Image (spheres, helix red, strand yellow):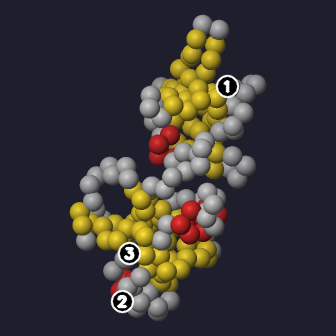
């Protein structure tokens, strides 16, 4: 396995292998992405396009392999990787993380980790007012919620296209329109 550089922005971590599944080299994976986007790919079957992945161990060593199959099962992903055909081979993968290279996204889509720490502003008569930084993002089913923190104050902001006016990745800045009552 190759040593992985810390903070490698070229990789997206998909999940962590927690156990083996069956006797034919399959593993049970806790997904870091929503199950629907992980298995079917909300970005035009992203996972289907992404067959080459990296298995990254606890010390950051990585090994490239291919996904042979993947399916959802009771909140987990059951995956089979090339060259792992027995339960003893699959045992070696416990606690490894599965990562892939960043894939291009459609216009207006962003990786969650790129939004973390982003400064958020809202327009006012005298210019922009800083609301805080995005410290967490979680899914509700209908839309994501950005947790914006400024000191001890926290705002739960619905990530809706009509409310997010601008995302500037270069300046790490987002401009939003606050909904009524927020």
Mark number displayed over residue 65: 3
The label nearer to you, 1 versus 3, is 3
Residue 5 x %, y %:
26, 55
Residue 40 falls in image quadrant: bottom right
Q: Relative to residue 120, is residue 8 depicted above or below? A: below
Residue 112 x %, y %:
52, 47
- For disc 2, the marked residue is 88
Q: Earlier in the sequence, mark 1 or mark 2?
A: 2
Mark 3, residues whose alpha carbon is within 10 Å: few (<14), some, or many (≥20)?
Answer: some
Mark 2, residues whose alpha carbon is within 10 Å: few (<14), some, or many (≥20)?
Answer: few
Do the numbered discs 3 and 2 sit on residues whose CB atoms are within 8 Å? no
Residue 148 falls in image quadrant: top right
Looking at the rendered structure, the secondary structure element under dot 1 is: loop
Q: Relative to residue 73, is residue 33 depicted above or below? A: above
Task: Please give the name of the residue rendered at 24% of the width and 67% of the height, measured from the top-left corner.
Answer: 2
User: Can residue 139 be seen?
Assistant: yes
- For disc 1, the marked residue is 177
Looking at the rendered structure, the secondary structure element under dot 2 is: helix
Q: Earlier in the sequence, mark 3 or mark 2?
A: 3
């Amino acid at each position: 396995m190759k040593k992985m550089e810390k903070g490698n922005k070229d990789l997206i971590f998909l999940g962590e292998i927690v156990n083996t599944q069956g006797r034919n080299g399959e593993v049970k994976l806790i997904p870091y992405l929503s199950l629907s986007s992980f298995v079917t790919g909300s970005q035009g079957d992203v996972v289907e396009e992404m067959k080459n992945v990296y298995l990254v161990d606890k010390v950051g060593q990585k090994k490239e392999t291919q996904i042979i199959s993947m399916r959802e099962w009771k909140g987990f992903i059951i995956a089979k990787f090339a060259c792992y055909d027995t339960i003893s081979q699959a045992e070696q993968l416990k606690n490894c993380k599965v990562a892939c290279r960043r894939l291009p996204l459609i216009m207006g889509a962003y990786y969650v980790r790129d939004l973390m720490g982003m400064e958020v502003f809202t327009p006012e008569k005298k210019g922009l007012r800083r609301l805080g930084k995005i410290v967490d993002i979680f899914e509700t089913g209908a839309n994501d919620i950005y947790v914006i923190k400024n000191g001890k104050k926290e705002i739960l902001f619905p990530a809706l296209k009509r409310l997010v006016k601008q995302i500037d990745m270069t300046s790490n800045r987002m401009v939003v329109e606050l909904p009524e009552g927020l």
